[in-house]
Structure formats: structure tokens, C-alpha cells
Image (spheres, grey):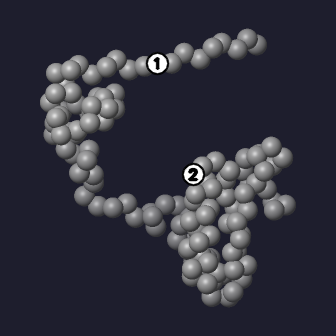
Amino acid sequence: MSLQPKRWQVAPPAPPSHIARFPHLHPILVQVLYNRGVTDPADVAAFFAGGDREPNPFDLRGVPAAVTRLRQALRGDEPIVVYGDFDADGVTATALLVQTLRALGGRVRPYIPDRVDEGYGLHEAV
């Protein structure tokens, strides 16, 4: 199996006339929107306005059960382990969750698996 070098696929630059249509936005931001097909002023405004309602985290599968279980653990003074991930967003999320649970009185500790020895995913032994 031969490894072929990766080739960057760079989007074409937005025409200067397009960038000029949005003087209130940084040209790089206009370029990113252009790359994503957001080119009409009404669509740009809608992009920044966001949706009409904030997403509800309880709509995510498993969240209601997880919250119920965490409440039970907090009330029962049970030890809690936050099983994190070793990438930047995983470490950040782990730190935030550990700090929040500690602020709620939880006996909590983080666990971040070793990238080399444990790899990705949950490990029952932990």
C-alpha cells in the first residue's frame, strides 16, 4: 500500500465585489461564509441571528437519565469519576464537569486515559 501525499483543496477567494458588500464584517469572515455558501445579505444576517430558540440539552438521548443518576450520586455522597478524553475539547469538558460537580458538593475525580496505552473509548477495567 503506497501512501499518497495529501492535497489541500483551497476554496477560491471570494470576489472583491462580494467582500465589499459586507463592509461591517472582517474580510476573512466574509470569505469563510462565502466558502460555506452563505452569500446573500439576508442569509448572512440570519446566520448571525441564530435560531429562534436555544437547543435543549435534555433533548439529547441519555441526558435525562445521566442527570437523574448524577443527582442520586450527589445526594448519596457517592464517589463520581468523570471519564474524559485526551484531546483539547475533552480535557476542557472534563475540567468543567469536575469543577461543576465539586461546586455541587460532589466527591469527584477526573480520569483521562493514556493515549498510547489505553487509546480511545471506555475501558471497563477503569
Where is residue 16? Give x, y as percent.
Answer: 21, 20
- Give the labeled residue for mark 1: 9
Q: x, y percentage for residue 1? A: 76, 13
Q: Residue 20: which quarter of the image?
A: top left
Amino acid identity at mark 2: Asp
Residue 72 at least partly seen: no
Q: Tell me the quadrant of the picture where the C terminus can be found.
A: bottom right
Q: Could you say whether the residue bearing mark 1 is in a helix, strand or loop?
A: loop
For label 2, the SS is helix
What residue is drawn where x is 72% and y is 50%?
121
Quarter of the image for residue 15 reads top left
> Which residue is drawn at the image coordinates 53% and 61% (left, top)?
61
Q: CA distance from mark 2 to mark 1?
A: 26 Å
Amino acid type, mark 1: Gln
Residue 77 shows in this picture: yes
Point out which mark residue 89 bears: 2
Contact check, label 2 and label 1, Cβ < 8 Å? no
Image coords of residue 36 (percent x, y):
34, 31
